[in-house]
Image: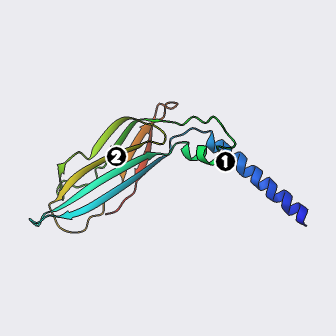
Amino acid sequence: MAIPSAKLLISAVAVFMLVSASFATSEMPFMVVHKKATLNRLKSGAERVLVSFDIYNQGSALALYLFASFFSAIHLMAAYDVTLTDNSWDKKTFEVVNGNTSRTWERLDAGGILSHSFELEARVKGRFHGAPALVTFRIPTKAALQRTQLHYYL
């Protein structure tokens, strides 16, 4: 009974390694977007919201870390024409007082980080549920932009 279960375990590990190897060599950008909204109350009674973004290109870096002992040459993939757009802030409810709600960068290398922030002033007090921000980027092997939506509720 121990021999069939050992063969099954070895087969499962072999399949896992083959599948993982195919993901490790895919050389695709993998974006992780972190959005943070911080409410600041001023002495004047006004409320301002500082919205900040950090965009991480994990790329094949995770695969490189996990499989460094098995693969010696994995090229990390950069993302090009990276654009962040956050148009979820209603102009009747919020006014942009510092920065822009969208930003474009030429390139984000694998393992790299991009940051952006802007500040809003609330015109109306109350609860607000924001829509997702949109991050688009281009992969050198594909002409079409890849789209990633960030779901966040304030």
139 sits to left or right of 85: right
The residue under the point 37% across, 49% down is 54
Q: First in sequence: mark 2 or mark 1?
A: 1
Which x, y percent locates residue 140? 49, 30
Instruction: Tell me which amino acid carries mark 2.
Output: Ser
Q: What's the mark number on residue 144?
A: none
Quarter of the picture holding the C terminus: bottom left
Which x, y percent locates residue 81? 39, 34
- In the rendered image, the residue lying farthest to the front is 69
Instruction: Tell me which amino acid carries mark 1.
Output: Ser
The residue under the point 19% across, 53% down is 91
Q: Distance between the Cα atoms at labels 2 and 1?
A: 30 Å
Q: What's the mark number on residue 115?
A: 2
Q: Nearer the viewer, mark 2 or mark 1?
A: 2
* Foreground of the two, 126 or 108: 108
- Residue topped by disc 1: 20
53 sits to left or right of 64: left
Element marked by disc 1: helix
Quarter of the picture holding the N terminus: bottom right
Which x, y percent locates residue 8? 82, 58
* Foreground of the two, 78 or 66: 66
* Colour mapping used in the image: rainbow
Task: Give the total number of marks visible in the rendering.
Answer: 2
Element marked by disc 2: strand
**Is residue 26 positioned above or below 150 on the image?**
above
The residue under the point 80% across, 59% down is 9
- In the rendered image, the residue lying farthest to the left is 44
108 sits to left or right of 7: left
Examine the rendering and report whether any part of residue 131 can be seen.
no
- Are there few (<14), some (14-19), or many (20+) residues within 10 Å of tag 2? few
